[in-house]
């Protein structure tokens, strides 16, 4: 054996992950990472499809999907190929220049939605920031409103930047961050009379209400689907007044509801809508889309250094195309129906724990009974111990948002694990 071969073998033995692989050390992690998340004691290392493995090699069925983000699951060949190819070709150049991949993604999104124009950023909060700025500029230049107000819903969630956390109708996210951004006002969700009263009051002296910002289905706030009749009346009210309707599709867009866009479940079209979570299949990208007559931004108004770079746009375009090629939206509808019927049976078997199930497609919530002796986090922990990853949507709802590629067998496996988990709670 040559010296070079001996050295190579020695190095291979050293690099072998099975030999002396250091266990994951949460204490070291916490010593350096800021304490912003209440983490589960689990470190994930590897994924394939709807399955992930932790650093001890334990397997989990992933019904969280990076919080409704990994549209194509983990390690999808199309995603691996797109990431690799785009990185080899070109990954970042800035918006000083034309980016062909950005144009391609914008075309796909506008051809497949009610929108005409797209702006790209890096997250859901940024997409909503862009929408808020666009609506304010529209109010100033098109409607001569001096101090525009944006209405949002109680229990909504729009992000963690100062403007979007202000837009978020949940005081727990705003505590200790005052002064908040002016120009927001909250109304109850799915309540048309309350909305009309609020607008009448705010617009009494002169028009001030610039936009209504709503989620088609409230995700973080507890998987609350929008009421079709309510949204149609909101649309009509906006048509009558010139108020813009902004829909936050960050969690529900990109096929998750069994329709490409959440608003299709409501039979309406927004003036502006935002995307992020599912758009990049796990690669960070956000988008704000709008109809032609709202596209009042001009050069200098808004920008993002990373926004719409060749890498994220190339990958997101592949996610969009794969969604269509693999007919994943049909899968969402079929698997969603199976999941909801299984969850409904579980809820009926345990009426002291669960009140019922709600959701669309593959965004579903198992709702705890009012006087249940447990919280959603207890169900999530018990499921994790059985090898199923779930995420709470508030204290009384357990959220199920698997990758859109989830199979019928995986839905049944998740239900079986959940049933075992519930036995450990009763
Ligand atoms: C997650 C979420 C956001 C925030 O997205 P980030 O990428 O975390 O900034 C905004 N709106 C909705 C509806 C969301 O679910």
Image (cartoon, rainbow, N blue to C red):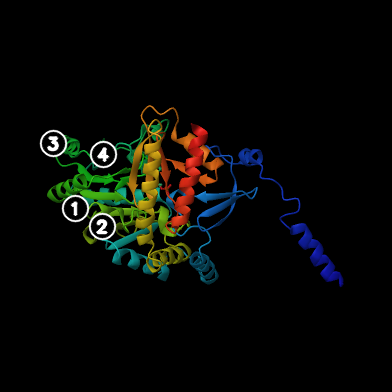
Q: Which corner quadrant of the image does residue 193 belong to?
A: top left
Dot 2: what SS?
A: loop
Residue bearing the label numbered 2:
296
Residue bearing the label numbered 3:
204
Q: Earlier in the sequence, mark 4 or mark 3?
A: 4
Residue bearing the label numbered 1:
142
Look at discs 4 and 1 and give the one toward the viewer.
Answer: 4
Dot 1: what SS?
A: helix
x then y, percent, for residue 117: 29, 62
Residue bearing the label numbered 4:
189
x then y, percent, for residue 24: 66, 45
- For the residues marked 4 and 3, what is the alpha-carbon distance in whole angstroms? 22 Å
Residue 228 shown left or right of residue 97 in the figure: left
- Comparing 186 with 226, the one in front is 226
Q: Earlier in the sequence, mark 4 or mark 1?
A: 1
Q: Earlier in the sequence, mark 2 or mark 1?
A: 1
x then y, percent, for residue 169: 32, 37
Q: Earlier in the sequence, mark 3 or mark 2?
A: 3
- For the residues marked 2 and 1, what is the alpha-carbon distance in whole angstroms? 9 Å
Look at discs 4 and 3 and give the one toward the viewer.
Answer: 4
């Amino acid at each position: 054996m040559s010296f070079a071969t001996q050295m190579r073998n020695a190095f291979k033995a050293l690099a072998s992950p099975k030999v002396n692989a250091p266990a994951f050390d949460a204490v070291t992690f916490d010593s350096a990472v800021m304490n912003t998340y209440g983490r589960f004691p689990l470190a994930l290392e590897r994924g394939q499809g709807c399955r992930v493995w932790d650093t001890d090699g334990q397997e989990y069925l992933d019904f969280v999907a990076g919080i409704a983000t990994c549209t194509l699951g983990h390690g999808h060949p199309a995603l691996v190929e797109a990431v690799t190819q785009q990185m080899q070709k070109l990954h970042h150049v800035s918006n000083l220049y034309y980016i062909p991949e950005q144009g391609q993604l914008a075309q796909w999104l506008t051809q497949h939605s009610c929108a005409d124009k797209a702006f790209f950023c890096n997250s859901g909060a940024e997409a909503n920031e862009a929408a808020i700025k666009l609506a304010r500029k529209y109010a100033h230049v098109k409607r001569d409103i001096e101090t525009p107000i944006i209405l949002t819903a109680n229990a909504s969630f729009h992000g963690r930047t100062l403007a979007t956390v202000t837009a978020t109708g949940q005081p727990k996210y705003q505590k200790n961050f005052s002064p908040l951004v002016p120009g927001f006002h909250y109304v109850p969700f799915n309540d048309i009379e309350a909305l009309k009263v609020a607008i009448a009051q705010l617009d009494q002296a002169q028009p001030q209400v610039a936009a209504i910002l709503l989620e088609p289905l409230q995700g973080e706030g507890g998987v609350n689907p929008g009421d079709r009749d309510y949204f149609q009346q909101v649309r009509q009210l906006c048509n009558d007044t010139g108020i813009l309707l902004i829909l936050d599709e960050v969690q529900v867009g990109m096929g998750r509801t069994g329709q490409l866009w959440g608003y299709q479940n409501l039979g309406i079209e927004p003036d502006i809508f935002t995307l992020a979570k599912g758009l990049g299949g796990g690669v960070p990208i956000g988008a704000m889309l709008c109809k032609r007559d709202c596209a009042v931004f001009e050069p200098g108004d808004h920008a993002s250094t990373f926004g719409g770079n060749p890498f994220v746009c190339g990958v997101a375009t592949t996610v969009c195309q794969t969604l269509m090629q693999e007919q994943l939206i049909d899968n969402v509808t079929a698997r969603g129906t199976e999941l909801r019927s299984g969850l409904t049976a579980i809820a009926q078997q345990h009426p002291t724990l669960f009140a019922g199930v709600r959701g669309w497609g593959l965004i579903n919530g198992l709702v705890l009974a009012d006087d249940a002796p447990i919280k959603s986090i207890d169900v999530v922990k018990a499921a994790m111990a059985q090898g199923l990853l779930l995420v709470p949507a508030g204290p009384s709802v357990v959220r199920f948002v698997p990758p859109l590629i989830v199979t019928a067998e995986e839905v049944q496996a998740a239900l079986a694990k959940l049933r075992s988990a519930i036995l450990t709670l009763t």
